[in-house]
Image (cartoon, grey):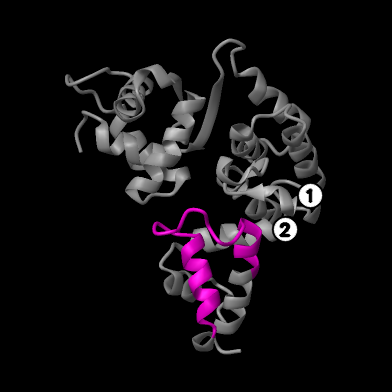
Amino acid sequence: MPLIHNGRRLALLKRSIGKDHTNPRPLSPVQVAEHIVEMKNDLGNPSSTKTAQRLGVSTPLIDNFVGLLAVPQKYHNMLGWGKSDGCPIPWSEIRRAGPFLKSGDITAEELDVLLKGVINKQIPTSMIEDILYLKKKNPEKSIEKCCEEILNLVPKKIRYVVFVTDIDPDVASRLRKHTSAGPATPNARAELALAKSLGAENLEGVLIKDGKHIKVALTEKGRKNLDVIAKKEGVLVRNVVNHIISKNDLGTK
């Protein structure tokens, strides 16, 4: 059926995703993915561009939803929007799993190990994405080892989440420049900039690795704040650390 005649599907999708979604959302994340695939087929646009434009969202967001369908089907009814719908695996933490499966950065069997740990409450949901990125950066490590390393980075009394992402070359270059306006070292500069938005009490430390990657140790509240800031300021979660540093750093812009 041509898209122009399927207004109900379009309305359901717009009420479920994007900045103006309703609460509660009428569709689950997997239902959104299924409807998006139908829309992509109607539009004859496998690149997702037209679908993203039609829904008023980013192309990566469309691809992340479609990627959910690669997650083993036995977990589909456990994927939800978060605490509001009571599902044990929130969309915000599992959204990268599909693209990682598609690119071969993780296998279905490895994802199964990770999600079993989440379902059994051995792995906090806030660590899913961190473990996925660690596995992507270290393909030679087993998924069990990646889970262990991330969990071991968290103190027992005060739980911290390690957020790992690529650092923008321009941001890394700026942080290396000496300035009298703040700390001289790139790590300290980055930590100060992040603290302005996340709160110093929510940061345990920052480490820039080889000028290419940045690791940020956050409280669980600080990790959630990254999602809030990303949504509020219209940036992808994987880019939000670079965004905050660029916004708050006292160095030369």
Considering depth in this image, is 14 or 238 the residue closer to the camera? 14
Residue closer to the observer: 209 or 215: 215
Q: Is residue 179 above or below residue 108?
A: above
Residue type (three-letter) at the residue carrying disc 1: Ala
Q: Is residue 33 left or right of residue 56?
A: right
Please tell me whether residue 143 belongs to the stretch shown in magenta: no
How far apart marks 2 and 1 lie (CA) works out to 8 Å
Judging by the rendered image, the residue that carries numbered circle 2 is 70
Locate residue 227: give its quadrant: top left
Residue at 72 percent across and 24 percent down: it is 148
Instruction: Find the magenta span and give its range.
Output: 6-34
Q: Is residue 20 visible?
A: yes
Q: Nearer the viewer, residue 170 or 7?
A: 7
The tag on residue 108 is: 1
Name the quadrant of the C terminus: top left
Return the residue found at the far front.
24
- Residue 31 covered by magenta stretch: yes
Residue at (42% x, 72% y) in the render: 53
Q: Is residue 184 left or right of 33 when viewed as pictured?
A: left
Q: Secondary structure at mark 1?
A: helix
